[in-house]
Image: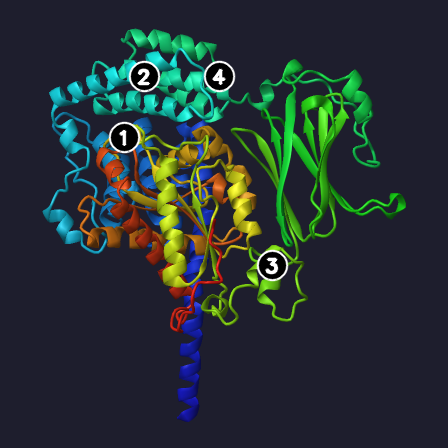
Amino acid sequence: MMHRSLCFVLVSLFLFIALPSVGHAAGAGASDAFFDAEACARELRKSPQKTKVRSNWTQCIDKFQAVYRQDSKGPWAPASLFHSGLLYSDLYKGFRNDADKKAAAEFFEQLQKKFPDSGYRDRAGAELQRLNAAPGAIKEEPPAKEISRGTPVAAEKEKPKKPAEAKTASPAAAASGAASQLLKGDACFQKLRGSQPTENTRREWMLCIGRFHNAYLEDPAGPTAAQALYLEGVLYQDLHKRLKFDSDQRAARENFEKVAKEFPESPFAAKASQELKAMRPVRPPPETVARRPLPPPVAAFPSEPAAPVPPDIAAETAKPAEGEEGLAVVQDLRHWSNPNYTRVVVYVDRETEFTHRLLKKDPTIEKPPRLYVDLSNSTLGGGKQKTIPINDDLLSDARAARYTLDSVRVVVDIKSFDTYKVFSLRDPFRIVIDVWGRNGTGSIAAERDEDAAPPPPGSTVERSRKVPRGALARQLALGVRRIVVDPGHGGKDFGAPGFIPGVHEKDVVLEIAKRVARKIREEMNLEAILTRSEDRYLTLEERTAFANTRGADLFVSIHTNASRDPRAYGTETYFLNLATDDESIRVAAMENATSTKNISDLHSILNDLLKNAKINESSRMAEMVQSALVRNLNRRGYDRVKDKGVKQAPFYVLLGARMPSVLVETAFISNREECRLLTTASYQEHLAESIVQGLRSYIKEINPTAFNEPAPGASGYYSGK
């Protein structure tokens, strides 16, 4: 009897330990299966021949349904239902079989019923309307729920008033407001057009742009909308001509395209089309770059940079001017490092093809291991070799030199390493080289080891030793001790303009981030480091490198959302992954300052990078933060909180992070009411309070005893200044 009881206990213990991991495994398998199904649908739609065969459609549908059956309550389930319905809808359009139409409707209805809080809910409703588009057949869809997930009954009883609804209800009032904003914009437009923008006066230009933008938002379909969009685009184009910031040219292009497409009868449509014809592509794709034939490949590479034409001679005799002859120009090399991680970034003025290779140590010529990157159809800015000394535990230096008349080689001399990644980002084009040491798991191993040798004076490791011995954070079993908080944008990058003229994303998120960092220190007794504590510009890749080199255990990037639709509002939280819907792609493109096409192209890079990203941990942390935001803001009495949920997308700022990382879109700065709230200290405080509550919940979940012990003072923690 005792033996039987012991067996029962052991079996129960095994199930208790093993079952939680099943969910993670299911999620991981569902992820791979979903992208396989998505690839099936993408390839099908590309081929007119394949679309004529019914079995090709059902094959892709079966793949999405397999994903749903594998994890019917997981994050991939609503996406799978939506795409199944979409495929049946397309199948109905091609074959006109009523059974396909019925199947599509059933999938969309099932999605709406089972996942009322999913971002796919509204899209499913729109597809249902298209399916039932016969006169009188359109069924009015209920509004998206705008309260917390815990109170669905209340959502049925009350239809919340959207923040911009009062303004759009009166056409006369909207037209009057639009005309007023347009007059204000025109006044500053006339003043600015007689001057040249500078870094110092950029804020004045953005204020004027904001007035035109608001003139459009006041009445997006009114008589002044086209003019407002066109003049906003002209100012963005003037900024780009002087300051050369790619996002300005991209914004100008988007405005001109919108005018030409949506207001074809307006006299400004012709002007916008002329501007578009005069604009060069933001980044010409590689195939459009003029190419010279490369010399035959070299069998063995001698001492780098071993070029058929030595760099010093090439600089004098074969140096093309920057931008001439269609060559990309390598402009700069930068690096960030700690003892276990180094990031080197090669900045290039346009996109070009590149290859990379690792060379082993060669004792015969006394050469250490080297990693090189060859850029084709390229030259050096100034024509001279560029070298940056690194001298950390992993790398000696990095240098760039002419390799042939039309190629550049970047060489990184290696002391030691465990793994490395090389990938490119766009707008502007740059090549990122990440090198990790054997202990480079996202935190500094020496800081965890009490018996380790003393670190060098002034090093990151040495500074971290100033944390009081026995402090709560050092006792956490899973090592959550240091959190990096990243206020998005800054400096010349203003982020999204607010509905209120003069309000910009970079200023709002800095205030929120400062409050988050303070609460982490004071209420959680953990270290909080800000990537920036003032109005200064940081590249997206620099922010990730900052978190990696500081040995961060968690990374939180704070932003505000924006949309051309002034009615859009709500809060959402993202983690790094492949985007599964158009809205996530749009948000990622906006935050990456690039195009939606580039986001789609980034998928091939991500497939490799995501192998080392902490996706499951980041997903869970995102859920905790999002849940806390919605719950706490509702509790604080904000009656227009819209839960847009947890989503995934390829954000540059999260690429290469080796710790759980999330990006929080706190609210829509382009919405009248949410913009007003974002400028108030009370709302900023409540947002910060909510984010910190979510982080606390995440830490508590992974280590239930994390906050049970008495907390020491915060005197030994980084100030983040």
Residue 622 at x, y percent in the picture: 38, 52
- Label ID, residue 188: 2
Label 3 environment density (alpha carbons within 10 Å; few <14, some 14–19, many ≥20) = many
- Could you tell which of marks 4 and 2 lies nearer the N-terminus? 2
Q: In terms of sequence position, does the residue under pointer 1 or pointer 3 come before the other?
A: 3
Looking at the picture, how far across and down is residue 705, in whole percent?
40, 72
Q: Residues within 10 Å of mark 1 (few under 14, many from 20)?
A: many
Left or right position of 298 against 51: right
Q: Examine the image and state in which quarter residue 262 appears.
A: top left
- Badge 2 or badge 3: first in the primary sequence: 2
- The numbered dot on residue 461 is 3
Q: Residue furthest left?
A: 157
Q: Give the residue type that dot 2 points to.
A: Cys
Would you place residue 566 above or below residue 151 in this image?
above
Determine if residue 476 is in view: yes
Residue 70 visible to the viewer = no
* Spatial separation of the CA atoms under disc 2 and disc 3: 52 Å
Left or right position of 683 against 238: left
**Residue that badge 1 annotates:** 499
Residue linked to disc 4: 241
Disc 1 and disc 4: Cα gap in Å? 26 Å
